[in-house]
Amino acid sequence: MRITDFDIYKDLLKEKSGLVLTQDKSYLLDSRLNPVAKKWGYENIEAMTNVLRGVPPKELIVDIVEAMTTNETSFYRDIRPFDIFRDTVLEYYKANPKVTKRLRIWCAASSSGQEPYSLAMLLKEKQHDMPGWNFDITATDISYEILDQAKTAQYSQFEVQRGLPITLLMKYFTQLENEKWQLSDEIRNMIKFKYFNLLDSMASLGEFDVIFCRNVLIYFDNETKADILGRMSKLISDDGFLFLGGAETVIGITDAFVAVPGQRGLYAKQDSKHLKTEAA
């Protein structure tokens, strides 16, 4: 691909999604955008690129962004964060119950739903330990297509074998005739899926006690990371928690959050009520 063509996609993706596309990843354009060009009836990617130089249809831009967005996920991915959520976060709220006994959780970049559904099953299993509590899980993604897939809550044999304990598979899923597995309504109904771009204003989302934003920030430059984390800090409650991916950090990016000692990937607000002593 010509450098001038590459720059068009690089600038488009940065503007619309925050995704930073480097030259060494240019091969992804061919593999992921050829199907988009074919869908729109263009002879090849070059023909589609020429359209982008003018005033392209908004729907075409949406398709390009969705095609370039990474949707790698699995049930209980990197199991440690879920252990920390169960043993540290939930235990904290059990010991320090909110007046409303309501826990609001946001899964940003939720992809095809495995992360929020994993949390929902975990909460269902812990419900007897937290009687009277209500759990409100909001899951968002930038891809309409992947959100539609998540809402169906149907997964292949390969997908349910990746990280999902067999006991939970048998308890909360039903095998369909098309060899897929259907998640039960009691778990599906615990999640509210909606479209959201992390570059947009977060004001409409409300306040959260826990935010999962794992393996997302690695695709952004530091300026965009700082902006997103800064706006998330305004959404999270004073005694709230933020989960990032194992390879992600706030160090050198923002002072809005500090690491929770001994809990990799778990962060609290800089002025957090319950971690002020530890953070100091």
Image (cartoon, grey):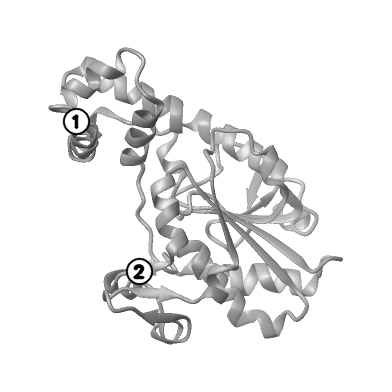
> Residue 234 is drawn in which quadrant?
top right
In the depicted view, which residue is nearer to us: 98 or 144?
144
> Comparing marks 1 and 2, which lies closer to the viewer?
1
Q: Which mark is residue 155?
A: 2
Task: Identify whether 128 is placed above or below 272.
Answer: below
Q: Position of residue 219 (x, y in %)?
A: 40, 39
Res. 253 visible in picture: no
Farthest residue in the top direction? 54
Name the residue nearer the viewer: 263 or 4: 4
Residue at figure coordinates x 32%, y 12% from the top left: 54
Neighbours of disc 2 within 10 Å: few (<14), some (14-19), many (20+): many
Q: Residue 17: x and y, percent?
A: 44, 33
Mark 1 residue type: Gly
Q: Nearer the viewer, residue 166 or 238?
A: 166
The secondary structure type at the circle numbered 1 is loop
Give the numbered dot on residue 231: none
Residue in the picture at 36% in, 42% down: 69
Left or right of 162 on screen, residue 116: right
- Tag 1 near tag 2, CB within 8 Å: no
Label 2: state its secondary structure.
Answer: strand
Is 64 left, or right, of 31 in this rendering? right
Residue 41: numbered disc: 1
| Mark pair 1, 2: CA separation | 31 Å
Q: Residues within 10 Å of mark 1 (few under 14, many from 20)?
A: few
Point out residue 132 in the picture as x, y percentages from the top left corner.
Answer: 78, 77
The tag earlier along the polypeptide, 1 or 2, is 1
Quarter holding the N terminus?
Answer: top left
Measuring from the top left, give residue 238's x and y in whole percent: 78, 51
Name which residue lies at 61% across and 37% down: 254
In the displayed structure, 142 sits above or below 126; it is above
Which amino acid lies under the numbered mark 2 shown in the image of this protein? Answer: Tyr
